[in-house]
Image (tube, rainbow, N blue to C red):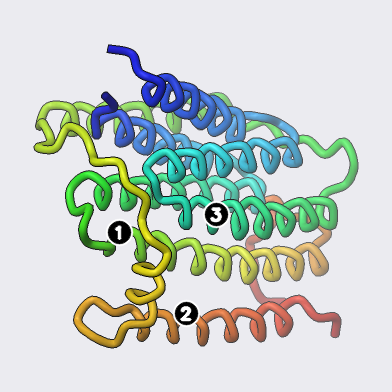
């Protein structure tokens, strides 16, 4: 039975797969960054479709809004115009392709051989109040310690980025 | 109805496309883009397992939330290192990175 959900999911899945393949095969690095942006948009669409709107918004804000800009700036800083990826030697490309396709086949085979118990999920939006209470909770299911640790990590990352990239 | 396997197939394909890019690309920024693809596939897996198997708990949700933040930090530091390499060598191809210290 074909429902609207299934159509939306199929479009998203094709979009993600094609964009990912193009991102790793295109010769120009700036185009690879653009295709990465498309993959990130598709992933955010999957989060929205699974009713995790907050996570989709975070994905759009941080990945599509922040990281992609960082990539584009660094590509413009480090590669000259008309810069193309050099050709790999043919046998290396073939070896890489064979290894990945074989591993993909094994993983898909094992995954599809064993059925998963739940075949569908109940629709229902995750309440932002629940997320906030869990994120700030100190009890058994609270996440306040990882929250603080990641703030320290981001501070260290800012200091490290400035230290590494500054002019001497 | 969308089966759980469909999502997992998408994320598996994304993962191995990322691995393929990581082992065939010779540009540091292109390799970093492949790493982002791998991270995204793992994030999709966490969210799908959380939604289908344990919808009343939030472990996978928060794991993905923190993974997004950590990958932002990782990208910022990696790009700082790459720009520093470019400043010293005028090139970010992997084959030129024989010596890290000079």
The relative height of residue A132 versus residue B94 in the rendered view (above or below) is below
Front residue of A142/A129: it is A129
SS class, disc 2 = helix
Image-quadrant location for residue B88: bottom right
> Badge 1: how crowded within 10 Å, few (<14), some, or many (20+)?
many
Q: State the image coordinates of residue B79 (x, y, percent, origin top left).
A: 68, 64
Left or right: A52 in relation to B3: right
Q: Nearer the viewer, mark 3 or mark 2?
A: 3
In the image, farthest residue toward the top: A1
Left or right: B51 in relation to A145: left
Q: Quadrant of the N terminus of chain A?
A: top left
Q: Quadrant of the C terminus of chain A?
A: bottom right
The relative height of residue A29 versus residue A92 in the rendered view (above or below) is below
Q: Residue at x 36, y 85 (%)?
A: A145
SS class, disc 1 = helix
The residue to which callout 2 is attached is A150
The residue to which callout 3 is attached is A57
Q: Chain of mark 1?
A: B
Q: Chain of mark 3?
A: A
In the image, farthest residue toward the right: A81
Circle number at residue B60: 1
Distance between the alpha carbons at the discs numbered 1 and 2 = 17 Å
Q: Residue at x 67, y 59 (%)?
A: A66
Q: Nearer the viewer, mark 1 or mark 2?
A: 1
Q: Residue at x 62, y 57 (%)?
A: A61
Q: State the image coordinates of residue B30 (x, y, percent, origin top left).
A: 63, 46
Distance between the alpha carbons at the discs numbered 1 and 3 = 16 Å
Which of the two labelled residues, at mark 3 and mark 2, occupies the earlier sequence position? 3
């Amino acid at each position: 039975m074909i429902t609207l959900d299934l159509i939306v999911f199929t479009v998203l899945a094709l979009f993600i797969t094609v964009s990912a393949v193009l991102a790793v095969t295109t010769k120009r690095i700036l185009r690879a960054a653009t295709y990465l942006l498309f993959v990130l948009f598709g992933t955010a669409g999957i989060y929205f479709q699974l009713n995790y709107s907050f996570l989709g918004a975070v994905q759009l804000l941080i990945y599509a809004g922040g990281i992609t800009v960082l990539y584009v700036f660094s590509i413009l800083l480090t590669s000259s115009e008309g810069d193309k990826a050099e050709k790999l030697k043919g046998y290396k490309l073939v070896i890489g392709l064979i290894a990945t396709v074989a591993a993909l086949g094994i993983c898909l085979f094992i995954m599809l051989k064993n059925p998963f118990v739940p075949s569908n999920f109940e629709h229902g939006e995750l309440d932002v109040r629940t997320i906030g209470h869990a994120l700030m909770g100190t009890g058994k299911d609270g996440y306040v310690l990882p929250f603080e640790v990641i703030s320290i990590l981001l501070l260290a990352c800012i200091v490290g980025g400035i230290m590494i990239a500054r002019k001497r | 109805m969308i089966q759980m396997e469909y999502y997992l197939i998408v994320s598996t394909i994304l993962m191995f496309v990322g691995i393929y890019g990581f082992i065939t690309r010779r540009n540091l920024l292109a390799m970093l883009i492949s790493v982002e693809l791998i991270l995204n596939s793992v994030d999709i897996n966490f969210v799908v397992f959380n939604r289908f198997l344990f919808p009343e708990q939030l472990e996978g949700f928060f794991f993905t939330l923190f993974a997004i933040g950590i990958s932002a930090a990782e990208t910022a530091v990696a790009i700082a290192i790459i720009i520093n390499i470019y400043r010293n060598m005028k090139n970010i191809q992997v084959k030129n990175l024989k010596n890290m210290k000079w």
